Amino acid sequence: MAPNDKFITLDSRLHDYMTAHGHNSDPILKELADETAALGRIAMMQIAPEQGTFMTILARAIGARRAVEVGTFTGYSSICVARALPDDGHLLCCDVSDEWTKIARRYWERAGVARKITLRIAPALETLRALPADHSFDFAFIDADKTSYLGYYEEILKRMRPGGLILFDNVLWMGAIVNEKDQSADTRALRELNDFIARDTRVDAVMLPIADGLTIARKK
């Protein structure tokens, strides 16, 4: 097998096996996932359980203390990140929906991480640009409107400490990223982001086929 051919296509049985052999849930996260699923099609905005576990492990591995999330929805990913932070750690959550984040607030309390989280209901670029010049982050997760991904990246990167990680969700866009017939604004924005990061010498980056595609950029 050539190195470039060393990958496997997951079917539902293999995916179920994979998730069953990781620490990918607990009663609180499962209840949150079930409540979110009951919302209907919009529940697709929630990250996959194995992605949440992966993010927790990454944040813990780098000793993250200060984190930011752009796009909180009902709170699954924020719980995963906040749990990785020390008791005096802090997660800034940026979202524009009071409706969905009300669910997040309930589960932050139940998960015992509410004291670590500050929620800002406002356009995320406004929130990020209003931060003090010396405000820094160790870890970031971007999962919001795709046309603003590059803007979020630039605002966060300049506040990221060397060695810090920025994660981008949905970078494969359910396979549409390689479908040239798809010229929607979101798809084109994700292509632009992916091409930009692949050339960006300020970071080391890797794209992984986790859930809907996850890019990890490490600031040099």
Image (cartoon, rainbow, N blue to C red):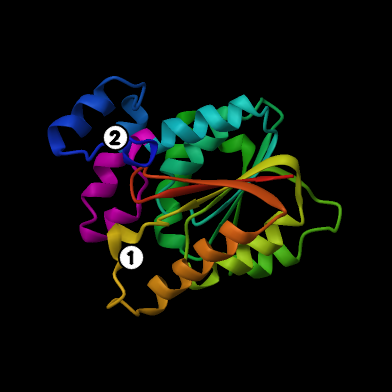
Q: Can residue 121 be spotted in the picture?
A: no
Q: Looking at this rendering, what residue extends furthest in the left direction? A: 13
- Looking at the image, the residue that sits furthest to the front is 2
If the image is split into quadrants, where does the N terminus sit? top left
Could one spot residue 131 in this view of the protein? yes
Question: What are the residue bounds of the magenta stretch?
Answer: 33-50
Amino acid marked by disc 1: Val
Chief SS of the magenta region: helix
Looking at the image, is mark 2 or mark 1 nearer the viewer?
1
Q: Residues within 10 Å of mark 1 (few under 14, many from 20)?
A: few
Mark 2 or mark 1, earlier in chain: 2
Left or right, residue 173 beside residue 85: left
Nearer to us in this view, 163 or 112: 163
In percent of the image, x 76 and y 57: which residue is there?
A: 158
Query: Residue under circle 2?
Result: 31
Q: Quadrant location of the C terminus? A: top right
In the drawing, what numbered circle is on residue 178? 1
**Residue 7 or residue 148, whichever sits in front:** 7
Spot occupied by residue 83 in the image (x, y as percentages of width and height)? 54, 29
How far across and down, in percent of the image, does residue 201 sit? 70, 55
Q: Amino acid at mark 2?
A: Glu
